[in-house]
Amino acid sequence: MTSFSDSSNSLLAGLSSTTNTKNTVSSADTSSLGKDDFLQLLVAQLNNQNPLDPQDNSEFVAQLAQFSSVESLQNLNASVDTIRSNYNSSQALQASSLVGRSVIVKDSSAQVDTSSSFSGSLVLPSTGSNVSVGVYNASGEQVKTIDLGQQAGGSVAFSWDGTDDNGNALDSGAYTFKATASIDGTETALTTYLPATVNSVTLGQDGGEMMLNLAGLGSVALSQVQMIGQ
């Protein structure tokens, strides 16, 4: 009489032989059994069980539960793949809408068109006096001091008309803005937020964050953007 063990081994060998003869099956598919293969094994096991020692009911129920788990995991993987595809599509659509837009980012440098007024902001952790913003050209020379006096803690806006301390108009280009204030008698460097134009966008890979490529400034993460303008 053929035992259950011998029948199961024969079935597994038959499945392996059949899989190797299918040219359309990829190596990834043959590396693990799917829910259909699991069900075939279960049915074959029932058909070939020893009639003098049939399978225990509790063991059969446990195998059915395993089959249900395999099916649920495969359905979950399919759902995750769909979510990832939808996320990538949404990210691409968002990226296309950002190109050419003006954004406010945490930075100390900006490309400035001196033919019009340039606006930015700084952050005061608490009330400070002698609040000022120094404007430096590409050579590192300070060309302008914007005096803001005493300010309360929070976000403080400032603007620059594109002229130096003598009132002479300066050329457009890259400028650096360094904000300082006296807080509790200590000279403190402050964080500045400046406008920039989005030239292009790099989509995140494998769930990574989208990167904005800003004109003359390089790349910053989307999470670093404080505000998106027109």
Image (tube, rainbow, N blue to C red):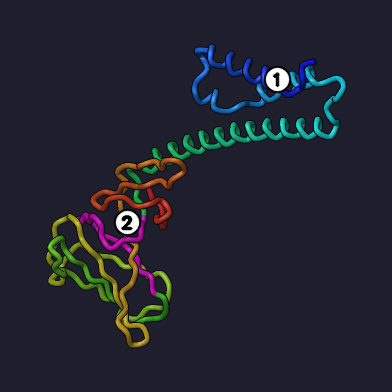
| Most distant residue in the bottom direction | 185
Given the image, on which type of amino acid does mark 2 rest?
Pro
Q: Position of residue 95 (x, y in %)?
A: 40, 41
For the residues marked 2 and 1, what is the alpha-carbon distance in whole angstroms? 63 Å
Local crowd at mark 2 within 10 Å, few (<14), some, or many (≥20)?
many
> Which residue is drawn at the image coordinates 86% and 19% (left, top)?
51
Overall secondary structure of the magenta section: strand
> Which residue is drawn at the image coordinates 27% and 60% (left, top)?
118
> Which residue is drawn at the image coordinates 84% and 34% (left, top)?
58
Against 91, residue 18 (above or below) is above
**Residue 167 sits in which quadrant?**
bottom left
> Mark 1: which secondary structure?
helix
Against 34, residue 62 (above or below) is below
- Is residue 148 visible in this depiction of the protein? no
Left or right position of 166 against 9:
left
Left or right position of 98 against 70:
left
Residue topped by disc 1? 40
Closer to the chain start, of discs 2 and 1, is 1
Q: Position of residue 48 (x, y in %)?
A: 78, 18
Residue topped by disc 2? 195
Q: Position of residue 175 (x, y in %)?
A: 20, 61
For the N terminus, the image quarter is top right
Q: Dots 2 and 1: beta carbons under 8 Å?
A: no
Between 33 and 94, the one lying in front of the other is: 33
